[in-house]
Amino acid sequence: MQRSLHEKLLLYRVRVKKDPEAFGKIYDAYAPRIYRFVFFKVSSEEEAQDISADVFLKVWQYLLDEKGKEVRHLPGLLYGIARNCVIDFYRSRATKETVPLAEALGDEIADDRRTNEKVEAKLDVELLGSQLRDLKDEYREVLVMRYLDELSVGEIAQALDKTAGNVRVLVHRALGALKKHTHAENDREPIEEPQV
């Protein structure tokens, strides 16, 4: 309840007084979550940063627009706009030529000297990311929102434009698919390396 009142006050200050400091507080509270949500969809730090910045620019414009609807759930608005920005990104990318990520970053990765702790953390994120990427986009979206960003079912429903019941079913199915995928990977026998 406290967060909701605080967010309503910030939204009021942004909409009525056009207060950039209030919007800065909204940005500080949600930027890491929106970035993570976008990153799991695009898998590139630079693109995720650009898209996340675009999300907050569009939210600012939406809040200042006189015709904008009342915002009941701020996270729902943010994730809805983030989702649309990712869709726009893939639409624009479909017409551009792309270079595989491993090829583009090959030299940079080879030269990068990270500590073991950072490498292990990155591998854990990559493992989770690869398991999530193997799921349907809808499942991946709902799992990131629910468990990484800790959104309520109602906030997810608003962001996805679904009913709360549909979101609950979607979360249940997504967890089942992730569990099945994880068990399938764990059941694979390790490949023995050839001896030299």
Image (cartoon, rainbow, N blue to C red):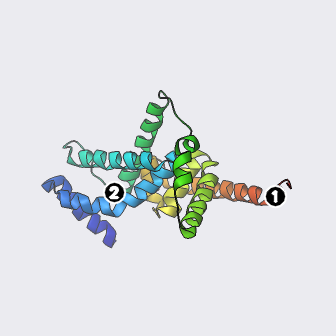
> What crowding class fits label 1: few (fewer than 14 Cα within 10 Å), some (14-19), or many (20 or more)?
few
Taking depth in this image into account, of 120 and 169 the one nearest to the observer is 120
Q: Residue drawn at (57%, 41%), measured in percent from left and top?
A: 103
Residue 153 rendering spot, x and y as whole percentages? 48, 59
Callout 1–callout 2 Cβ contact below 8 Å: no
Disc 1/disc 2 C-alpha distance (Å): 46 Å
Residue 45 percent across, percent down from the top left:
46, 50
Q: Position of residue 109 (x, y in %)?
A: 54, 52
* Secondary element at tag 1: loop
Amino acid under disc 1: Pro
Of residue 109 and residue 5, the one placed in the foreground of this image is 109
The x and y percentages for residue 55 are: 35, 47
Q: How many marks?
A: 2
Splitting the image into 4 quarters, where does residue 185 fall? bottom right
Marking on residue 60: none
Residue position for label 2: 74
Res 47 seen here = yes
- In this image, 26 relative to 76: left or right? left
Q: Is residue 140 above or below residue 125?
A: above
Residue 10 horizontal side relative to residue 186, left or right: left
Q: Earlier in the sequence, mark 1 or mark 2?
A: 2
Q: Is residue 166 visible?
A: no
Give the residue drawn at x 39%, y 54%: 76
Q: Which residue is mark 1?
A: 190
Above or below, comparing residue 88 to residue 110 in the picture = above
